[in-house]
Amino acid sequence: MKRIIFFSICLTIGIFFLLACSPQTQATPTSNVPIVLSPIIPTTPPQTFTCTKLDIAPTSTPNAASLFPPVSGADYTLGPADASVTLIQYCDFQSQGCLAMSRIVVELMRNHSDLRFVFRPLPLSNILDKSDASVLAALAAGEQDKFWEMYDLLFVRYNEWVNLNPSQFEAWILSQATLVGIDSNQLEADMNAEETATKLASSIEAARGLNIAAVPLILINGEQFFLLDYQNISDTIGVIALGKKQFTECPPFTIDMTKTYVATLETEKGNIVIQLFADKAPLAVNSFVFLARQGWYDGVTFHRVIPGFVAQAGDPSGTGRGNPGYFFDTEVSDLLFTKPGMVGMANSGPDTNGSQFFITYAPAAHLNGAYTIFGQVISGLEIAEQLTPRDPAQFGTLAPGDMIIKITIEEK
């Protein structure tokens, strides 16, 4: 009984002291009270997209310091005046080298919408017997705004007149002019006009001042270009024109690593569906998703397709030398190139990932550790295997690559 009374006394004293030490007003728990009912522990730290922005101008422009005169209203031009690339050709209509270049120019103009072509007559009067007469014919046709019609006539039907003597040539050109919409009487008058002769003399004098050793002479944005085959010229045009599409800043990190991303590549041959590994290669997936949503890959071709090895795409220039204006680090995980359909980032060395990617056709152990694996084909591998083979490393004109119409990203 005494123990019960003693315990009651102690309990009463304890309650008294607790009440005495408590606040005088009633209060609910405040935000500084560390109460967590359902703590959420992040599995990974917050991500940021770290990359290297390339110190390049967004668009390569014509060289203002060129030794050659800039394009003016006196020039004969084709293509948009504000094109990223200006190709200037100094040439003689009778030159076989210029004939070959005219065929290349046709293909270049067909395949590059962002190209301006400028033709500057360069008479080789001391070498070719119809040099002056053919240039006079083109200049005279220009008086009727038909310079390019005469240009086409002279090159397309080159074999019909190249072996004629000068007087036969003049008769031939007058008889053929009407076929391309040129008034032959006006053409003859303008060919014999003093003003046209003055233009011819100016062309000859200008060429002497530039000390041009041989034709065709090609300038790309004011700089002389020496690799006079279609592929090299086309590749250079493509890389320069790509500047308009390149980004001047690295993309923000916007993917949610807790979600699943699936990319559907709609190609000319059919659809290729890729599961993206955001948890294994967040930088690569973030960049790929960003570029796809920006339309970077729309209209891009598979520029490198090696049967039994890989199909590579992602470069709008179609050359394999293009990039989005930034590079990001290589991400090495436990994923390996052990089977067909693995999707990796192409690079030109450590930490130079950009926009180009590849799909494997077979196991490729030699790629392990050097290339980021960021996805796997889950549908349409047979479509990838039907892509047109082409190897840019091989010399010569390549077959057109199969196009990616667009890439759609699904977030789950």
Image: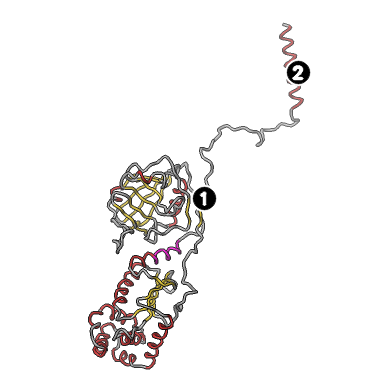
Vertical placement of residue 1 versus 201, above or below: above
Q: Where residue 107 appears, x then y in whole percent?
A: 32, 69
Q: Give the structural element (helix, strand or loop) at label 2.
A: helix
Q: Where residue 329 appears, x then y in whole percent?
A: 47, 49
Number of residue marks: 2
Vertical placement of residue 303 versus 220, above or below: above
Vertical placement of residue 75 versus 395, above or below: below
* The quadrant where residue 267 appears: bottom left
Q: Which circle marks residue 100 in the picture? A: none
Instruction: Name the kind of residue labelled 2 in the image.
Output: Ile
**Neighbour class for label 2 at 10 Å: few (<14), some, many (≥20)?**
few
User: What residue is pinned by disc 1?
Assistant: 50
Judge depth for marks 1 and 2 and give the one in front: 1
Q: Give the structural element (helix, strand or loop) at label 1.
A: loop
Q: Where residue 64 appears, x then y in whole percent?
A: 49, 74
Instruction: Name the kind of residue labelled 1 in the image.
Output: Thr
Give yes or no for contact between labels 1 and 2 (Cβ–Cβ under 8 Å).
no
Could you tell me which quadrant the C terminus lies in?
top left
What segment carries the magenta color?
Answer: 236-245
N-terminal of the pair, mark 1 or mark 2, is 2
Specify whether residue 168 is painted magenta: no
Residue drawn at the location 73% of the way across and 23% of the way down? 18
Whole-number angstrom distance, CA of label 1 to CA of label 2: 64 Å
User: What residue is pinned by disc 2?
Assistant: 13
In the image, taking residue 257 as reference, residue 157 lies left or right, namely left
Q: Nearer the viewer, residue 158 or 109?
A: 158
Specify whether residue 241 is painted magenta: yes
Q: Where residue 32 appears, x then y in whole percent?
A: 66, 36
Q: Main secondary structure of the magenta part?
A: helix
